[in-house]
């Protein structure tokens, strides 16, 4: 009969390098682990490369990964923005564009990365003497979304999440065209006279019924995926409109209520709307991301976004050469804690270059602030302890497993993982996979939780090492999309070693 023990401390630090044919000698059904001190590149989190259509007519995802690696970044995400101004006057998108979209998603899968998608019609603001970009009519945008839907649904495994886009310059929901009125002006702000389709109209970002219909349509074409909004006010207003509230007014305070654990990860509008901030730390209000004037509304919006992002996604970019830091604050600590407060999972690698240089040059701990962000952006799941209730099992007998997990990162898992216990027989590598949980999100950012499971032992005798898989349900057979724990243990073929073994007889 076999025994089970905790591996010696030096072996844990070395990384559990035993081969499948090496039997594990153990004295306890418990393993305890130390966290990995450095970055653990993982799917759907971290710094993201950037790509724009039509400037880049087709996405070469592998080239983007190589370019980032040359700069010292292991990217697992690419934000791909599609500027559709060439099609804004057409009721149907050309087949050539749909083929491009499909090719880009396939390129992402070949490279083992996912895309953050944004579709927009206005690549910049309207400026005197320059081209005039206008929002298309609502019906045309809806028709375009229906055309893209089959392509998106066929490649959901290549999509991390979407940014709402569609309206205003850069798809950021400001400067909406007054002619189409896809959004309403924010009360209390005088926008002044505007040229056709608006210019510098930053206050026109209050959702109305047309906005709600566009967001609903986008969500419908990507079942299960999150759609990130540019402003916390926008999410609150969409929820108020869904509840039958008035248009043209600042949202009632009751709609700035963040997601609760029971609401999280569901199919409701509230659960499927995430966030992106494209001017993070640019000013006290992040250049209008929050309510413009300091006071109760601004603070409510900040607190709302921070708490709500615990169960969704927070992404975005910086837009200034250096961060806004209030007087008297330590710059490095303030910036780091701001990223933590708003639970950032994704940050644009390419913008703003000055801000990125500032991060690299700012000491933080033993290294730079940039290295700290590489490590802590997004989820960072650490397995503190794994325990089984027995080390000797009959064929097919149930085994109880307890996992003590802690999330050390800024953000949380926002797409579910398939949690599996894998028995690997030492003598020949024969593997038996037992599902534990099909929609696993793990502990939210900054939290620790114990998980208890029962799994059936293999029906073939032998001594088995135990491994944990956190697989992507949409890419179940591709270990590049499996989650690696931020734990000092072996990670091989997408499996995390639990440093435990059982004998099945």
Image (tube, rainbow, N blue to C red):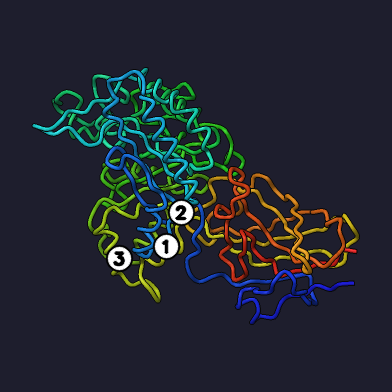
Q: Quadrant of residue 145?
A: top left
Residue 76's tag is 2
Judge from the rendering whether residue 414 lies leftward or rightward of residue 300; answer left or right: right
Is residue 247 something that shows in the picture? yes
Q: Is residue 5 above or below residue 480?
A: below
Quick one: label 3, few (<14), some, or many (20+) residues within 10 Å? some
In the displayed image of the protein, which residue is found farthest to the left? 129
At mark 3, the secondary structure is helix
- Position of 273 with respect to 204 (left or right) is right
Q: Nearer the viewer, residue 424 or 215?
A: 424
Q: Where is residue 214? Give x, y as percent.
A: 41, 25
**CB contact under 8 Å: marks 3 and 1:** no
Camera-nearest label, 3 or 1:
1
Residue 255 at what x, y percent from top left?
Answer: 46, 34
Which residue position holds label 1? 374
Residue at 33% x, 44% y is: 298
Q: Characterize the local packing of mark 2: few (<14), some (14-19) or many (20 or more) Cα atoms within 10 angstroms.
A: many
1 or 2: tag closer to the N-terminus: 2
Could you say which disc has been placed on residue 135 in the image? none
Q: Residues within 10 Å of mark 1 (few under 14, many from 20)?
A: many
- Nearer the observer, disc 2 or disc 3? 2
Q: Earlier in the sequence, mark 2 or mark 3?
A: 2
Q: CA distance from mark 2 to mark 3?
A: 28 Å
In what element is the residue under mark 1? helix
Q: Are marks 2 and 3 in contact (CB under 8 Å)?
A: no
Mark 1 to mark 2 CA distance (whole Å): 12 Å
Q: Give the labeled residue for mark 3.
A: 331
Q: Position of residue 43 (x, y in %)?
A: 51, 53
Q: Nearer the viewer, mark 1 or mark 2?
A: 2
Q: Earlier in the sequence, mark 3 or mark 1?
A: 3
């Amino acid at each position: 009969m076999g025994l089970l023990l905790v591996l010696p401390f030096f072996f844990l630090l070395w990384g559990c390098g035993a081969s499948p044919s090496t039997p594990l000698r153990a004295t306890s059904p418990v393993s305890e682990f130390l966290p990995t001190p450095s970055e653990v590149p993982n799917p759907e989190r971290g710094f993201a490369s950037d790509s724009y259509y039509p400037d880049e007519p087709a996405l070469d995802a592998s080239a983007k990964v190589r370019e980032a690696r040359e700069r010292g970044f292991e990217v697992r995400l690419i934000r791909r923005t599609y500027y559709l101004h060439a099609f804004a006057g057409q009721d149907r998108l050309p087949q050539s564009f749909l083929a491009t979209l499909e090719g880009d998603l396939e390129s992402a899968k070949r490279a083992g990365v996912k895309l953050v998608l944004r579709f927009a019609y206005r690549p910049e603001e309207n400026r005197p003497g320059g081209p005039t970009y206008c929002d298309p009519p609502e019906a045309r945008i809806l028709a375009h979304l229906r055309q893209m839907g089959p392509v998106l649904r066929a490649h959901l495994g290549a999509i991390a999440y979407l940014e709402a886009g569609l309206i205003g310059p850069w798809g950021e929901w400001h400067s909406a065209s007054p002619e189409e009125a896809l959004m309403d002006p924010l009360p209390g702000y005088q926008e002044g006279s505007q040229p056709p389709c608006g210019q510098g109209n930053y206050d026109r970002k209050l959702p109305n019924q047309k906005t709600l219909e566009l967001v609903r349509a986008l969500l419908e074409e990507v079942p299960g995926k999150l759609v990130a909004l540019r402003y916390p006010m926008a999410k609150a207003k969409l929820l108020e409109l869904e509840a039958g509230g008035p248009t043209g007014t600042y949202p009632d305070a009751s709609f700035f209520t963040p997601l609760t654990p029971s609401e999280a990860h569901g199919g409701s509008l509230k659960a499927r709307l995430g966030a992106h901030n494209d001017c993070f730390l640019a000013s006290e209000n992040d250049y209008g991301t929050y309510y413009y004037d300091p006071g109760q509304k601004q603070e409510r919006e900040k607190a709302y976004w921070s708490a709500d992002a615990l169960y969704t996604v927070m992404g975005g970019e910086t837009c200034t050469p250096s961060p806004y830091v209030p007087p008297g604050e330590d710059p490095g600590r303030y910036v780091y804690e701001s990223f933590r407060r708003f639970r950032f999972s994704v940050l644009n690698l390419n913008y703003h270059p000055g801000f990125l240089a500032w991060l690299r040059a700012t000491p933080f701990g033993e290294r730079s602030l940039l290295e700290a962000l590489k490590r802590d952006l997004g989820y960072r799941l650490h397995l503190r302890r794994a325990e089984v209730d027995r080390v000797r099992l009959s064929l097919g007998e149930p085994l109880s497993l307890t996992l003590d997990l802690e999330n050390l990162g800024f953000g949380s898992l926002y797409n579910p993982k398939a949690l599996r216990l894998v028995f690997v027989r030492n003598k020949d590598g024969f593997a038996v996979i037992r599902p534990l949980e099909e929609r696993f999100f793990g502990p939210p950012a900054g939290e620790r939780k114990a998980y208890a499971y029962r799994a059936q032992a293999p029906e073939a005798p032998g001594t088995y090492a135990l491994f944990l898989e956190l697989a992507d349900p949409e890419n179940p057979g591709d270990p590049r999309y499996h989650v690696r724990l931020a734990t000092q243990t072996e990670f091989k073929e997408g499996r995390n070693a639990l440093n435990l073994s059982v004998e099945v007889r």
